[in-house]
Structure formats: structure tokens, C-alpha cells
């Protein structure tokens, strides 16, 4: 997987991610991939010595902290809500004064004094270490200053962060002047294409200090402009100690620490003597609170008290390590080789965005993590790729994320009413209160034109939320949630689809018109006056699934709960009959013997893929290329990402075949593979999710072609294969999806019917691995996959045996035991998950050439 190293990253072992050298052009990417967080807030891995600029986008983001601004774009007033870039707690710059010389320049990796530079992300312990070596000029010649900085965002104490910066003098004696600050003069400037939009979200700054002659903490408080969230940070900076050469004079700071306060910046300044060969450490401890936090009298008081109470850096580091050790125990994943290292990096960033602390917050799944400002920190459908992993490790986090959706169910119902529909119409992009946050315009950087954005027509997001409710309940056994909040979500989404379906007597089928599917390239018919497409296959099949599950759940509810819920929702019993009818007669279009992505897809023109590859090379964003040429991708059989094939990602082979049978169609091996053959070469993979989905369906249909796509999904962010997007924030759904690819796709794992169902289909490149999962009250069920066998180990407990179904064999594995089970032969029924290739599609078609 040498392609993964095009960013300069190296791994010294299975738990570290290291960059050697300083590369300004790649610095923003490294900032994203070296982000540290704890589920409450996260800080990009920016250099503390530098400020925002072309090579640097420092950013600190707290989960759920949004603000709304209005901009004027292309002559129109446009309102956008953003996850707010909070005051920057990182700034810590330094310069030296050699004895007998004037103070030197402020040192940074961007300056000419830099000799060496490197940084290492420690995944096991959740720390970032940065190392720099600078030349130092004095009257007696040049010396050197060695700087090493260790940074953490505390996983155990979610409001604390800290960094220790150590200075070693080599060949000189003098002083190091350190300036440590909290900078409130920040904006949302992390995405270049948003440059024309309003970006100052903070106001009403105030600063202060502890009044201890400069030794106490400094603080900064501010508010968001529209959402009126109060934010407070407090920082304590101290000389922590020294080691090395025996000092020849007083080693205390030359003068007492002093503060410098402006309305938007709180600074502490220390001047520390240092001898040649001696190392002196300066510790900065920071606390962050907002007015959204529970159980505080106010954010400023909470932040200043937290800093005053915080122990020194060594104890903070030790407790931080303990917290990460507990996290990793619950997220066991052992995959050999470089793929395993990248998977662990993905898992690290998922856990920093959605940790056990998330269970206490009212937040959703930000598509780009807490790692940058792309997509404005909004919540899309990415939880569809994230929750299946969390369900089997941190179900309390999954439940909290579904709680975010439940609390915004009233907003979804209002949105449905506003367009004349019943039920709940969830937004494609969600933020603070659940209204639709999708942009009305988007910029094509190639043409410089602002274009209408119709992505809000992706109503399939409601089906994704319903799917997550069901999957969470199956994995966790949480019937209290399923019969309560989950039932309301499922029923209201089902109502929306039932009211959206229109009977077509000519087809004798129900149809859903005017939508956009997962493939965002197609948002209208060629030259149509209005946006929207009819009968998107993915949308209709998943809508049928939702209606079926809502019926099943309605009948399974305890009588008293059912009566209470149906009365409150005013659910007419006749609605159930309509749901059942629609669930069996929704239209799924076909053309040429394959499932049509939408009605009329087969009538579109074929694209000259070779011409565009030869002319442009990377054609992932084919929509932008064609628009800049005055053309439209709506005219062609060309998809941004797997659309129809997403069905093979969501549903195991038998369930997918049953769904199509319910809708009156036969989906067997031959027809499914024909559909795969048809769409893969017509997909540009402009979404990071596309390679993941392609790998998933190929692993179950044509294993020999799956690895190329799996590899692309693995390296998507670490190699930034989309050319600059990762610098704006990681792709959280794609990262979590690779974990789930190993956890569920390659094992065939389903948690259903009070048991674990396994149907392993390991790839040759991933034929030996181990995952630990939480199933109901068994906290660490150990699954070990080998080429022809699977081991199921259940930890000792007072619980009953775990029911395991593998092929047509059923086993009971008691707690405290483990069993090796042989993999069965090919399954003759339904879609064969281990079938060989029927016909090959060139892996180069529709994919980036390497």
C-alpha cells in the first residue's frame, strides 16, 4: 500500500503515525490527520508557533456549537449555519536571547532558522509530539535550540487540554522568552471556497487574569453572534522543571510571569534562563466550557476553576493514558500489516469525534468529524456508515446520536407539513435545531460560478435514520428505545413515504417523484425546468423496507404502548393497510435487464470516459468538469458514487433478494452481478463513500476485484486522493465504513433474532484478523477470522450462552469458552456471498489511475 505514503507519513509501529520534515504544502492535511479530540471538543494538529495563513488552518471545534450568518452571494442573500471555530488555545511562541546578544526572531517551522522538523501521532495514548531543531545566532557563533512539544486533549476530563514544550540549549547560554496566548480573533476560514461567505461568528470578547501577579490563569470569554452561546477558555502556563547540565546561576524565571490583555487576546509571558546542555519545560493547561454544558454556574467560572484544579502535566498525561486504555479495550481491532495501521488511525479519529462523552451531548454525526470546517460541520446521512460500528462497541453513543434525531423529529414533521406531506421529512443537512441546512447555492471552483444546490431533495436520509434505529435495537436489544423514541421515528418516516407514493394506473404501481438519490450528480432530467428525478431505485427500495419494518414494529408493540402511541400520533388503522400495499407495489425501474438508477436512466447518453480521463486525469468531480465546459452531467450515464449498489451495502444477500421478491422482482446472482457490471464502469467515485460501497458489494459478489476498492477506501484520507479535501476535515463516514467493512462485511456478522449470525467472506489480503464486539450484555465477544475457520470466544460472566449461527449450523458458546467453527461451502440459495466472477470489469474504469 505504498500509495498511502504520498503524504510523507510513516509508521514506526502499529500505533504511531509519523511525518518527517516540514512541508508547507501538506501542512493543512497533516493538521487534519493529527487532530486531537475527546468527543466534546477537538483541536487540529496545527503548530503552536504559527498563526492562520495559507499553510495553516488552526481550529478548535466543540460538538454541537453552531452559529448562523447571512451572506450576499451572486446577488442573493444566503443564510448558512456553521460549526464555529472557537478561540485558539494553541498559541505558544518563543525566541531566545544568547548572552551578550539582542533577542532573536520568533521561531517557527516557517522561518529560515529551522534545521529539522517532525511530528508523531501516538494512537495508543492519544498524544501528538512535535519536534523541531533551530539554529541560534550569538556573538560567539551559532548554537542550536531543540524544541519538543507533547500535546493532549484529555479523553478522561473532556474540558481539559494541555501541552508541554521542552527547550534544550545546545552550544549557548541565555534566555528563552515564551509567549503563551488564548486568541479570540478567529474566523471560520478553513475552506477556501467559502471565502466569499460571512465567517466571523464570535462577538462580545472579554479577557482577564487570575490577579496573582501574572501567575494565575488568563481567560477569554466570548459569545456566538446569533445562537448566543457563551464560550470561555482559561489557560495556565508555568515553568515545569529542568534537567541536564547543572545550572551555574539562579534557574528561576528572570522575572515574574506577566500578562498582556487586549479585548480579543489573553497572553502570559515568561522569560526563562537556560544553560547549554540544559532542558527546561513549559506547561500550558487549558479548560474550555460553553453555556451548553450541564451542571455549571457559568462557562467562565467553570473554565477558570477547572484550570486552577487541574494537576500538573505528568498526572494529566497519566490519567489521559488510562482513559484511552479503557477506550481501546472496548474497540478491539487487530488486522495485520499496513492496512491494520490505517484502520487503527481511522478508528482513532472516529473515537475522537464520537467518544463515550458524546453520550451526554445533544449532537449528531458531523460528516467531517471535529477536524475542519468542510460541510460546515453539518450532519448528513453519514451515521448510516458510523452507527453499525458503534452499535457493537459503544451502544450508549449510538443511542445518544439517535436521540439527536428524535429531538428533531418535530422539526422533520413541520418540514413535511410545509410541503403538504404527512409524517417526517428529515433534512439532508442538519445542524442545531433540525431545519434544512443544505446550501441553496454551491460554488464550482473550476468555472467560478455559483449554481443552484438541489441536494435537499435527498429524502432517503429519512430511511437511513429509520435503518439506524432498527439496526441499533437489533444489536443492543434495547426494546425500551425501540418501543419508545425509535417507534415514533420509524412510524413518522413510514408516514412520509406512504404520503409521497402516488399511484400510477398505467404501471399499476406506486411511484415516488421529484427526489435525488445518493448519486448527487443527477438532480434533474436533461433540460427539465424543475429539479428532481422519479423512482430512484435506492430510495424506493429503502422506502419499502421502512414501511415493512414500521408495520412489523406496530404489531409488536405491547398493547398499552401501542394504544398510547397511536392515539398521540393519531394513527388511523387504515394507514397500516396502505403501508402494506405500498411496500409491495412501489415501482422499481429496469432497463436492459438491470435495475435502473431512476426512471429514464437508460435513455441518457453514454459518456466518453476515455476522452475525459485523457484530458483531465482525475475526473472524480466530473460534474464540475462538465459544468465548466457548459455541459451537464444530468445528460449522461455517469454517477458520482454507488447508488443502486448501496442496496448491497445495506442489506445482506438474502434480505435484499427478499425485498425485491416482495416488490415483485427476482434478484438472483446473475441479475445482481449484471447490475454491478453495469454501474461500476459508469461511476467516477467522486465521493469517498463510493469505493467503500464498491468494495463491500464486490466482496460479496466478486472477491478478486474487491481489494482495489477496499484499498482506495483505506487510503482515501491518508493519501488525500481527492486532492485537498481532507485538509478541510476527515471523511468520518468513510473512515467508520472501513472499520465496519472488516467488522461486518468480511465476517458477514448480523446481530439479529437473539443471536450472532456469521457468513465470513474474507479477502485474500484481509484473510486473518480479529475484532471484539459487544453483543447485548456480553461486553467483549472475540471473533477471529482465518481463511477457512472462525473462532468465537465469549468472556466469562453470569449471562447465558451466545447463540451463533454459521451457515445452516447453530452453536451455543457459553461464557468463559471459545469455539472454532469451520466455514461452510457455497450457499445455493439467494445471492451467493462466495461466488466467483461471472464477468470482469476493468478496475481502472471509473477509478483513479495510479
Image: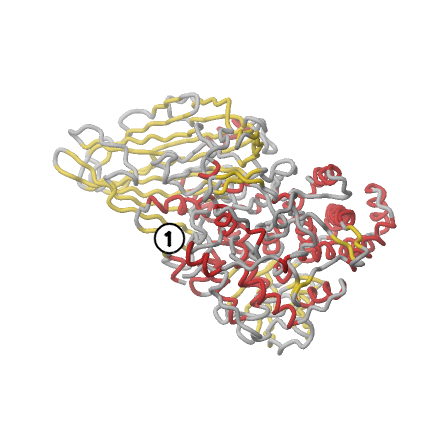
Residue 680's spot in the image, x, y percent?
55, 63
Labels in figure, total: 1
Q: Nearer the viewer, residue 42 or 237?
A: 42
- Residue 344, placed above or below residue 116: below
Q: Nearer the viewer, residue 100 or 443?
A: 443
Q: Is residue 151 left or right of residue 538?
A: left
Farthest residue in the right direction? 573
Residue 274's spot in the image, x, y percent?
24, 35
Q: Nearer the viewer, residue 41 or 762?
A: 762
- Of the 4 image quadrants, the one containing the N terminus is bottom left
- Of the 4 image quadrants, the one containing the C terminus is bottom left
Q: Residue at x 56, y 38 (%)?
A: 441
Residue 329's spot in the image, x, y percent?
53, 56
- Can the viewer see residue 650? no
- Residue 388, placed above or below residue 664: above
- Can the viewer see residue 728? yes
The quarter of the picture where residue 467 lies is: bottom right
**Residue assigned mark 1:** 7
The quarter of the picture where residue 211 lies is: top left
Amino acid at each position: 500500500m505504498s500509495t498511502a505514503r504520498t503524504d510523507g507519513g510513516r509508521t514506526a509501529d502499529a500505533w504511531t503515525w509519523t511525518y518527517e520534515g516540514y512541508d508547507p504544502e501538506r501542512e493543512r492535511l497533516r493538521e487534519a490527520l493529527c487532530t486531537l479530540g475527546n468527543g466534546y471538543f477537538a483541536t487540529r494538529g496545527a503548530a503552536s508557533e504559527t498563526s492562520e495563513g495559507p499553510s495553516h488552518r488552526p481550529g478548535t471545534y466543540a460538538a454541537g456549537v453552531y452559529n448562523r450568518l447571512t451572506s450576499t452571494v451572486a446577488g442573493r442573500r444566503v443564510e448558512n449555519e456553521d460549526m464555529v471555530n472557537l478561540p485558539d488555545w494553541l498559541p505558544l511562541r518563543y525566541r531566545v536571547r544568547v548572552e551578550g546578544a539582542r533577542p532573536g526572531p520568533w521561531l517557527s517551522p516557517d522561518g529560515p532558522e529551522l534545521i529539522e522538523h517532525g511530528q508523531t501521532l501516538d494512537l495508543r495514548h492519544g498524544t501528538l509530539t512535535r519536534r523541531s531543531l533551530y539554529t541560534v545566532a550569538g556573538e560567539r557563533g551559532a548554537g542550536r535550540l531543540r524544541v519538543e512539544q507533547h500535546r493532549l486533549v484529555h479523553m478522561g476530563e473532556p474540558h481539559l487540554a494541555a501541552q508541554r514544550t521542552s527547550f534544550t540549549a545546545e552550544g549557548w547560554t541565555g534566555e528563552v522568552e515564551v509567549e503563551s496566548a488564548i486568541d479570540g480573533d478567529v474566523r471560520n476560514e478553513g475552506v477556501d471556497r467559502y471565502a466569499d461567505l460571512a465567517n466571523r461568528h464570535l462577538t462580545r470578547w472579554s479577557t482577564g487574569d487570575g490577579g496573582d501577579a501574572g501567575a494565575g490563569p488568563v481567560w477569554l470569554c466570548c459569545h456566538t453572534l446569533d445562537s448566543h452561546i457563551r464560550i470561555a477558555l482559561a489557560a495556565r502556563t508555568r515553568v515545569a522543571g529542568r534537567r541536564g547540565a547543572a545550572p551555574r546561576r539562579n534557574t528561576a524565571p528572570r522575572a515574574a510571569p506577566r500578562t498582556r490583555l487586549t479585548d480579543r487576546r489573553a497572553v502570559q509571558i515568561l522569560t526563562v534562563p537556560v544553560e547549554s546542555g540544559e532542558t527546561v519545560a513549559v506547561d500550558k493547561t487549558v479548560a474550555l466550557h460553553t453555556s451548553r454544558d450541564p451542571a455549571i454556574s457559568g462557562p467562565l467560572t467553570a473554565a477558570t476553576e477547572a484550570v486552577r484544579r487541574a494537576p500538573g502535566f505528568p498526572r494529566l498525561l497519566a490519567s489521559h493514558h488510562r482513559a484511552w486504555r479503557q477506550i481501546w479495550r472496548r474497540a478491539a481491532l487487530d488486522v495485520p500489516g499496513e492496512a491494520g495501521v490505517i484502520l487503527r488511525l481511522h478508528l482513532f479519529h472516529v473515537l475522537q469525534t464520537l467518544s463515550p462523552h458524546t453520550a451526554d451531548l445533544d449532537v449528531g454525526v458531523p460528516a467531517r468529524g471535529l477536524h475542519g470546517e468542510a460541510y460546515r460541520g453539518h450532519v448528513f446521512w453519514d451515521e448510516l456508515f458510523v452507527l453499525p460500528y458503534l452499535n457493537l462497541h459503544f451502544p450508549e453513543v449510538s443511542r445518544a446520536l439517535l436521540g439527536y434525531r428524535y429531538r428533531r423529529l418535530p422539526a422533520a414533521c413541520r418540514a413535511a407539513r410545509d410541503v403538504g406531506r404527512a409524517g417526517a421529512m428529515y433534512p439532508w443537512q442538519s445542524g442545531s435545531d433540525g431545519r434544512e441546512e443544505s446550501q441553496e447555492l454551491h460554488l464550482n471552483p473550476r468555472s467560478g460560478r455559483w449554481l443552484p444546490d438541489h441536494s435537499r431533495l435527498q429524502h432517503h436520509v429519512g430511511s437511513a435514520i429509520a435503518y439506524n434505529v432498527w439496526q441499533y435495537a437489533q444489536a443492543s436489544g434495547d426494546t425500551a428505545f425501540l418501543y419508545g423514541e425509535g417507534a415514533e421515528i420509524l412510524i413518522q418516516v413510514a408516514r412520509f413515504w406512504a404520503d409521497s407514493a402516488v399511484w400510477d394506473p398505467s404501471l399499476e404501481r406506486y411511484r415516488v417523484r421529484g427526489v435525488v438519490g445518493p448519486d448527487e450528480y443527477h438532480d434533474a432530467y436533461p433540460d427539465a425546468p424543475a429539479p428532481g428525478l422519479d423512482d430512484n431505485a435506492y430510495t424506493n427500495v429503502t422506502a419499502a423496507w421502512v414501511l415493512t419494518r414500521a408495520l412489523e414494529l406496530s404489531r409488536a408493540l405491547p398493547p398499552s404502548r401501542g394504544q398510547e402511541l397511536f392515539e398521540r400520533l393519531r394513527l388511523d388503522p387504515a394507514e397500516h393497510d396502505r403501508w402494506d400495499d405500498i411496500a409491495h407495489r412501489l415501482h422499481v425501474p429496469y432497463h436492459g435487464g438491470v435495475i435502473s438508477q431512476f426512471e429514464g436512466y437508460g435513455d441518457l447518453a453514454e459518456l466518453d470516459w476515455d476522452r475525459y480521463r485523457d484530458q483531465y486525469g482525475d475526473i472524480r468531480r466530473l460534474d464540475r468538469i462538465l459544468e465548466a465546459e457548459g455541459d451537464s452531467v444530468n445528460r449522461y450515464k455517469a454517477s458520482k458514487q454507488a447508488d443502486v449498489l448501496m442496496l448491497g451495502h445495506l442489506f445482506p444477500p438474502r434480505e435484499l433478494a427478499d425485498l425485491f421478491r416482495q416488490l415483485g422482482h427476482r434478484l438472483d446472482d446473475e441479475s445482481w452481478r449484471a447490475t454491478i457490471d453495469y454501474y461500476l464502469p459508469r461511476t467516477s467515485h467522486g465521493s469517498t463513500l463510493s469505493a467503500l460501497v464498491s468494495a463491500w458489494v464486490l466482496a460479496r459478489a466478486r472477491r478478486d476485484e474487491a481489494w482495489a476498492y477496499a484499498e482506495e477506501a483505506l487510503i482515501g484520507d491518508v493519501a488525500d486522493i481527492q486532492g485537498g479535501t481532507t485538509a478541510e476535515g476527515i471523511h468520518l463516514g468513510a473512515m467508520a465504513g472501513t472499520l465496519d467493512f472488516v467488522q461486518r462485511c468480511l465476517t458477514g456478522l448480523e446481530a439479529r433474532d437473539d443471536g450472532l449470525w456469521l457468513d465470513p467472506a474474507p479477502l485474500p489480503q484481509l484473510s486473518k484478523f480479529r475484532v471484539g464486539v459487544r453483543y447485548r450484555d456480553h461486553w467483549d465477544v472475540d471473533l477471529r477470522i482465518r481463511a477457512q475457520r472462525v473462532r468465537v470466544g465469549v468472556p466469562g460472566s453470569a449471562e447465558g450462552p451466545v447463540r451463533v449461527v454459521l451457515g445452516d449450523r447453530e452453536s451455543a458458546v457459553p461464557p468463559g469458552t471459545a469455539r472454532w467453527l469451520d466455514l461452510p461451502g457455497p450457499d445455493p440459495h439467494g445471492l451467493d456471498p462466495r461466488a466467483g466472477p461471472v464477468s470482469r470489469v476493468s478496475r481502472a474504469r471509473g477509478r483513479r489511475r495510479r
